[in-house]
Amino acid sequence: MWDGKRYCVACINAASPELLSFARAHAYLEETLTLDVISRKKFYKYNFFYPLIGLLVIFFPLGWLVVGFWNGFLLALFPVAFLLPLYLLSLKLDAAGKSAAEELPRTLVVQNNQLIVVHEQESQFYDLSELYYYESDTDRTVDNLYLENRPALILEKTPGWNWQRFVWEEIRYACGLTPEKRELWSSFFQLIELPRKEMSSTRSYHFKWTLLVVTFILLSLVIMVISYRTCFMLIALLTWIYPLQALSTAKRISTKVVTVCGALLMNGFMFFAFVSRNAMYAGLFCLVEMCLFLVVAFYIRKRLKQETD
């Protein structure tokens, strides 16, 4: 069988007669996602609508506390002015389709006790012993920017922070996107006794994330009341997480440049509004940030090169 172990015919047949006939005819178990499964609506919602709402919710209360209601309202409109041209440009250039084309077709292959995630340019390998599965829908996967929501089996590895790539790794892939495939994958998982976990519903999952975000915002407001400069420094640090991730994961140089410039522009504007009210000081602050970013960027690049070697 595809996990590298031998099973009697009766054992496989007991799990599923379809699994037995499929295993006899195929050297590996696979399932492919193609470009026709992408949802442009979900892509733009996750990349523009949700971030915009989050920025408005964060910037307006902070601006209200520091510079007053109307100035705070103008401050909250800044991310709208920043994201709207990007949204229109990406809509015109079909960024959803191009981004999906970089990741799809994506094929999940099980062979020799490994889950192999195959893309056109690269593949990732995971031992089946490191994974568990559960029944949910495609909103819970790392493909949720592309996939229309549908029932599926979710293969997952315990998430964790990868310090070498400076990225939070979430290994979570959907398989069994049709009833026939879902029965096949489920039978195979039962046969090899892959750990199964009972997960909360997707609605509960999103509720927990919403609660976490609201808690973060309230905590930020408390810190803001105590010391808005301390709050600014925390936000400035958080805004650099995405550019550092893009440095190690983004395939296009334009993506890296846009994320860095966006972080500099946002932090410079916040420094001017919250801390100094001096354009020269804000520019010097952005220059220092850029120097620190370059130091970290070269360090990450060196670690990635060592990892590749």
Image (tube, rainbow, N blue to C red):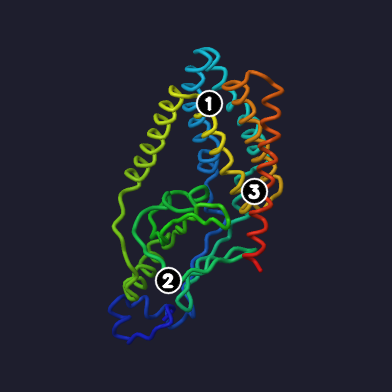
Residue type at mark 1? Arg
Kindly state the secondary structure of the residue where label 3 is placed: helix
Q: CA distance from mark 2 to mark 1?
A: 48 Å
Kindly state the secondary structure of the residue where label 1 is placed: helix
Left or right of 44? Residue 23 is left
Residue type at mark 3? Val
Tell which circle, 2 or 3, labels the residue nearer the N-terminal end: 2
Left or right of 301? Residue 118 is left
Q: Are marks 3 and 1 in contact (CB under 8 Å)?
A: no
Query: In the rendered image, which residue does mark 2 sit on?
Result: 128
Left or right of 252? Residue 236 is left
Q: CA distance from mark 2 to mark 3?
A: 34 Å
Residue 242 in percent (x, y) is at 57, 44
Vertical arrangement, residue 70 with respect to residue 44, above or below: above
In front of the other: 254 or 221: 221
Residue 56 in percent (x, y) is at 50, 26
Report crowding for label 2: few under 14, some 14 to 19, many 20 or more residues within 10 A (C-alpha).
many
In front of the other: 112 or 244: 244
Vertical arrangement, residue 206 with respect to residue 181, above or below: above
Q: CA distance from mark 3 to mark 1?
A: 24 Å
Tell which circle, 3 or 1, labels the residue nearer the N-terminal end: 1
Mark carried by residue 229: 1
Residue 259 in percent (x, y) is at 64, 40
Report crowding for label 1: few under 14, some 14 to 19, many 20 or more residues within 10 A (C-alpha).
some
Query: In the rendered image, which residue does mark 3 sit on?
Result: 296
Count of numbered circles on the image: 3
Quarter-of-image position of residue 185 = bottom left
Residue 69 in percent (x, y) is at 49, 13
Kindly state the secondary structure of the residue where label 2 is placed: helix
Tell which circle, 2 or 1, labels the residue nearer the N-terminal end: 2
Image depth: mark 2 or mark 3 in front? 3
Report crowding for label 3: few under 14, some 14 to 19, many 20 or more residues within 10 A (C-alpha).
few
